[in-house]
Structures are given as structure tokens and as C-alpha cells.
Amino acid sequence: MLKKLTEEKLAEILETGIAEFAEKGPDRANVNVIAKKAGISVGVLYKYYENKEAFFQACLRRSLGVLESVLHEVIESDDKLLTRAEKMIRAVQRYSREYSNYIKMYNLITSGSGKKYAPLYAAEIESMTAKVYTGFIERAIKDGDIRNDINPRLFAFFFDNLLMMLQFSYCCDYYTERAKVYCGEDILEDDEKVVSELLKFLESAFTFCQSEVVHKK
Amino acid sequence: MLKKLTEEKLAEILETGIAEFAEKGPDRANVNVIAKKAGISVGVLYKYYENKEAFFQACLRRSLGVLESVLHEVIESDDKLLTRAEKMIRAVQRYSREYSNYIKMYNLITSGSGKKYAPLYAAEIESMTAKVYTGFIERAIKDGDIRNDINPRLFAFFFDNLLMMLQFSYCCDYYTERAKVYCGEDILEDDEKVVSELLKFLESAFTFCQSEVVHKK
Amino acid sequence: MLKKLTEEKLAEILETGIAEFAEKGPDRANVNVIAKKAGISVGVLYKYYENKEAFFQACLRRSLGVLESVLHEVIESDDKLLTRAEKMIRAVQRYSREYSNYIKMYNLITSGSGKKYAPLYAAEIESMTAKVYTGFIERAIKDGDIRNDINPRLFAFFFDNLLMMLQFSYCCDYYTERAKVYCGEDILEDDEKVVSELLKFLESAFTFCQSEVVHKK
Amino acid sequence: MLKKLTEEKLAEILETGIAEFAEKGPDRANVNVIAKKAGISVGVLYKYYENKEAFFQACLRRSLGVLESVLHEVIESDDKLLTRAEKMIRAVQRYSREYSNYIKMYNLITSGSGKKYAPLYAAEIESMTAKVYTGFIERAIKDGDIRNDINPRLFAFFFDNLLMMLQFSYCCDYYTERAKVYCGEDILEDDEKVVSELLKFLESAFTFCQSEVVHKK
DNA sequence: AATGAATGAGAATTCATTCAT
DNA sequence: TATGAATGAATTCTCATTCAT
């Protein structure tokens, strides 16, 4: 039916926009080019979206929507904190390849581009994960799974910082290069290495430690 | 004398450019406006820089130069890893306020804008810190200050990820909002809280842990 | 029956067009908007009218048709010239309020918009009144009602000029403001004042005068 | 060409704009075309005028300025009302040919185009003549030159209506055609005829009349 | 026949870059 | 050499018109 077609087409337009915005950035991306690549006329684009800005917002929302739904899948489970963490790291690795453009879009708003929308998006996007992560940590503390001398909100923040950087490292040019500089050319292909080291880092961070360091043999 | 003047003027031009780029982003910043604000003619600007792109690069380099010199001050010391970490966190807090624009410039290249220069910059900027941090960690392991079951490069990577996010949290709109969402409205004014929690996180991450978690009383 | 319906619909479409053209002018008026307001699809509009221009012409013709029929009512009578003049002034005042949009349409072609159609419309619209007015004046001269030393065509022209300006003064923004500037803010509400003064002006213009001016006491 | 814009050039640009606006109307006139015709780039045009609208306003003001200065020349004299009237009619005839475009610009704002500026312009343009004409008439009444049973403001209004229509008749397509329809094909070349008949009309209108009409032989 | 989504040429506006002075 | 006015390509957005359904 016509409606169905339109919806598919709309999705296609958004995807084209996302691809273009992700590659060129919101300013260098050209509305006419996007329309041409999407196989439609500019007119259609402007029928659905008031202006370039609005279209960019739509692309952004779609991207964030996808990312969020992926996140939900992972979060759903009722595992312990570190099991969850592992799942999340693996999820990041998996969908970073598939949804690279969505993450690039996310990256875009973290830089100046989205300026005026920063507060809006930050609240919208981050508050969900913030709440979830903080909740996890609080529960883990109560359950005695992790140390109890920490501020759950700040630790959730550090935790998400690490995940966020991991995401960008897999998807965004600069961060990709940076990861290679730090960890070696092949790091982004060696998923297990990343998982194990990051988990080691996190597990330890969340656990009480001996004051005396004892070297294992 | 003339040369001196020119150099000062050049610095002023770059600073004006940095301010403008940091505020508007590389695409929305206007070369003519920058020239006017710097009190020179566009002609001069184009005498020194081939085009807008080249000028942006120059602003970038200046920004990175400043950041690097600040970093060196901190790195110079010969403290233990966590003492160094504390110094770095405090440094970030201090210069994030003073050099906010430089950090914004840094943030700019991490997003799409710098695309083609990403590899170049990543190598240039990050390899220094990568080497330094990795060296620190290796030394700390040798000295028995921290656990020895870790990959120094990846741990250096995680360490810098946390510092980088902290920097951006103090300077860049989106990250600022995000930090507030995670840690509360006042987090960016409560430097001690950030220092102590992040240090707790890092110290623990770098230390061997008991398998059994024991809750402190 | 169907034809009747269509005719009504057509009238409605034209009225919508007239309203829109009168408000926005021929260029700023939007065909799609008109269609929507008229409750039809653009397709229908383009079925009846070759293009926007043709549709505008149709709106114009309808407007002129209405104005002409109003004019006829007034002209029909067999009064003396000044009685007729009074009737016409009062008619202008009356229908200026009711048919404001038609007069605005008329005003539209008198400005650049209608350019290429100017000769056509001028001939069509004005020749009727020209003939009628000139006829009146010739008859009045013959009847000895007015002076006989005048050129009936030019006096008819002057007469219509005054009526035309009166019309526009009641309906068209600029002319309305202008009338207020000349005659005071309330002039357009004081119909009697306008009638009496204009009649005075006309009566006198059409009458032989003493060479010596004698002031009444 | 990279030549500095002189005042002459600026005047030339305005004249080009006036010509284009007068011919095509404010909406159909094309800024790029005007720039090309004026031998400049669009950029220059937008350097001097914020947007098309502002440029149109500037063209308008220039036109009105010229018209006003012409008017002043005529008004300056200290003649009797009808002598003045004659001078004005002849002035209209003279400058209608030379300054046809300025009058077309004037005509443009009297139609819908200027809509939002109507009140502004009406006040600005018309109040001068309104005051002058009304003053003339009041003086003429005091001097016993004309009848004293009239409202000076309204008679000034009627007087200006006739002059305005005359102007448009000489310059604006529709009005030109209309004049021919009323007065014959050659009317606009026969200046004397227009002068004498219109003066006859005016003189009479401003003079007391015998109640009894006496036919001259 | 009627619809109205889609088309795309056209117009306004911006701004990096040039170059005559 | 420095200036900044001038350039015009590029981009966004509109809307008269078409045509598949």
C-alpha cells in the first residue's frame, strides 16, 4: 500500500541522510545530494522536513533510536554487574560494525555541531543509561557484589565514559586511529583482548583491594 | 622588531580564530569575521594561510601545542602512578577553565570535521601521551606499585579515555550536560569529589583485588 | 445536477482564489494553498485552468463581472447627471465594504502585475463605463443641464478618475492610508461628508461659473 | 572586475533595480539579473542591502526622492491656485516621460506589493503634498480667489486624486490604455488638450457657480 | 475523474577567495 | 605590502506543474 511504501521510502531517505551526515558532518552534507542519492527530489525532503536542520534532527533521532533499542536488549538481562559489563562490551563491538553510522551521528552531537541542542539531547539520551547504570551499581553494592565506599553516580559515569570511548574507537576516524596508537594496529580486530583487559580494569575498579599489592607469579 | 610584532599579531589572529572555531565549529566560522575581529584584513590572513582549511589547521596546532605544554609540566614530575594521576586530574580541572577553547578545538577534530586529518593528528597528538602513560604503567609494574597481570598499553588507553572524557566534560557543551545528568548539577564545581572518586576508581583498577569482596564497616 | 454542483464548486474555487490573490498579490499567492483552502486538489484546479496565470485571469474576470453588474444597477436609472453621480458615490461606498476583494483585484491589474494584459483589460473594463459616462455627459449638455464648453470624453475621464480613486481609498491599503492623511483619520467612516464634498466638487466642475467669485455669507 | 563602488555606481545599481522593478514588479524582478545588468556581482548588492526587500525599499526611496524634488520645484512658486495647478499639470506631463520608472515604482506601492509598508509610505509621501495643497486652498479661500464653502482637505484630496491619475495615465500600462479608451488614442500626445480641459474642470470645481446654467453661444 | 505526492527549475543568499589599489 | 571591496560558485528552499494511482 501507499502508506507502507512511504514509510519504507522515508526510512531509506533517513538512512541516506544518516550516511551522508555521518560522512560529511551536518554542514558539509548537501541536501540536494542526499535527495539525489536517496532517489527522490529535494521537494519531497522538504515536504517531510521543514528544513535541513529538521532533517538532520530526524536522522539523529533515528540513529539514537536504533542505538537505544540495541542497548535495551543488552540491559534487559538480570545478570551481575560484571556479566552485564561483558555483555555490553561485546554488544558495542558487535553493533559498532553494523551500526557504525548511527554511532558517528551520536559522535556528531557530542562535538560543537549540535551546540544548541546539546542540553536537550544530553538529557534525553544520557539520562536513561545514567539511571540504569547507577541502579545496577546501587543494587550490586546492596548485594555485596562490589565495594560500598563509592559514589554510584560517579562510578556509573566513569563506566559509561569507558564504554562511550570504546564505541567511538570502533567507529569514528579519529578515535580509531587513537586506539591504534595506544593499543597497536590490530587492536580493533582483537575483540577478546579488548574484552578481557577492559573487564579486568572494570572488575578491579569495582572491587575492594588489598592495601598491599601482591604480585602474582 | 617588526618580526616580533608580526609574531604577536599572528598569535592574536590564531587566538581569534580559535575562539571563533571553538564557538561556531570549522564550517560555521567565518573567515571574514575572524579577520575583522582580529583587526586585520582577510588579505593578510590569506597571505599567511593558503585557505580556510590551512588556517583552521594552524589554529588546531596552536591549541594542541598549548595543551601539550601544559601536559608536559604535569608529566615532568617523578611521582608514583597514582600521584601522577591525581596531578593530571587536577591539571585537567585547572586548565579546562583557562584553556577551554583549546580543548574545544581538540574535541572538534575528534568528530567528523577533521576526517582526512584524523590519522595524522591522532598519531601526532596521542602517540606522545600513549608512550608516556604506557611507560609509567610499565615502570609501575616493574616497581611493584601496581598489578602485573595487565596489558600496559590497553590500561594506558583506558586511563587516557577517562581523562579525555573528563576534559570534555569540563569544556564541551554536550559532555558538560551529560556529566550533570550522570553526577548531578553541581558536579563540575565540586572538584574534590571528582578527584577522590576518580582516583578511587583508578587506584582500584590498577591494583590486585581480593577474590572475596569484604564490605568495610 | 452534477453540472450545477461543479458550477458552485467552481465559484467557490474562484472566490478562494480571489481572497488569496487580493491578500497576497498574484505572485505571493500560492496555488497549492488556494486549492487546499477551496477543498479541492491542485489537479482539479489545473484541469480547469491551464496554469496559475490563467487561474488568476479567471479570478480577475469574476471580480470584474461582479463589479460590472453592480455598476449596471446604478447606471440603469434615468436620472440627471448629478443624481446619478450621487448614486454612484453611494454605491461605491456601499459595495466597497462588501466587495472589497473584487476591488483589490481590480487594483491589482492597474499595477505592473497584469502588464501584458493591460491593453486587453483596459479596453474591456473601461470602455463600458467610458461610453456610458460620456453618453451621460453629452446628453446632459444637450439637455442644458451642464455647461457646453467641455470635452465630454475628458470630463468623463476626470469623473471616473475621481470615482476610481474613491473606490481604492475605501479598499486598498495604500489608498486608505492616503485618504486618512489627506482628510483625517475618520474620513472613511463619514460617508455623508465624502458624498457632499465630492458632489460639491463635481457639480461645480460641470457647471458654468461666474468670472467674478462672490463669497457667500 | 574588481573596482571600488563609487557613488555613481551605487546610483547606477539603484537605477538598474528601479528599471527592473518597474518592469517586472518586486516579485518577478530577479536580484541576480539586476546585478548582472548593473554590471556587478550579487555579492556587492548584498553588501549594500541586507536583502532583496531592503534593496527594493532603497529603489523605492530613490524614486520617491526624485519625484519629491521635482514636485518641490513646481510648488516653490508663489502663484495663484490655478496657475499653480497648470504648472503642476505641465510638470506631470514633462516628467512623466523622463521619470516614467519612478512613477511606476510609486504605482507599485499603491498596489498590494508594498502591503506592510503602505501605512509608512502613505504617511511619508502623501502628507507633504496633503499639507501643501490644503494650505494652498486655505490661502486661496482667504484671498477670495476661490469659493469658501468647501472643506479644504477634501478638495485637496480630490485635486491630488486627479493629478495622481494623470501621472499614472502617462506612465503605467493599464492607466495608459484606460486614458486612451476614455479620451482617444492620441490623448497622451496632445498635452494642450489635457491641460485646458483639466484646468477647466478644476477651475470650475473651485469656483462658485450660478444656480442657473447659462449656455454660452 | 480526482487526487496530492513528487518533481525540479529557479530564486535568494552566503562566504571563501581574489586582486586592484 | 596590506587592504577589503568585489566576485560568483554553491547551497538552501519554494512552489508551479505533472502524473501515477
Image (cartoon, coloured by chain):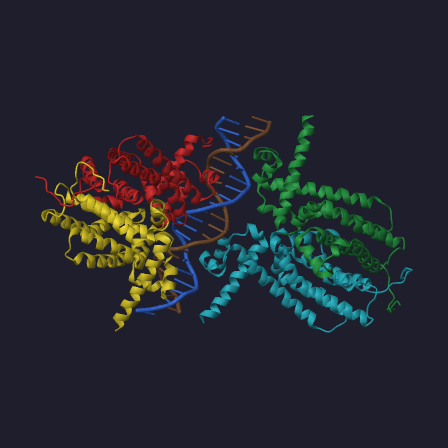
Chain colours: A cyan, B green, C yellow, D red, E blue, F brown
Going 11% across and 49% down the picture, which residue do you hit?
C139
| Residue D140 in sight | yes
Locate residue D89: give its quadrant. Answer: top left
Locate residue C210: give its quadrant. Answer: top left
Q: Nearer the viewer, residue A7 or E1?
A: E1
Q: Left or right? Give the position of F16 relative to B213.
A: left
Q: Nearer the viewer, residue B12 or C112?
A: C112
Q: Left or right? Give the position of A154 relative to C41.
A: right
Q: Position of residue A134 (x, y in %)?
A: 74, 66
Q: Left or right? Give the position of D4 relative to B147.
A: left
Q: Left or right? Give the position of B72 relative to C54.
A: right
Which quadrant of the rendered structure holds the C terminus of chain A? bottom right
Q: Position of residue A52 (x, y in %)?
A: 52, 55
Q: Position of residue A130 (x, y in %)?
A: 71, 64
Q: Is residue A83 above or below residue D1?
A: below
Going 61% across and 36% down the picture, which residue do you hit?
B49
Q: Position of residue A112 (x, y in %)?
A: 63, 51
Extreme residue in the left direction:
D217
Q: Nearer the viewer, residue D88 or A147?
A: D88
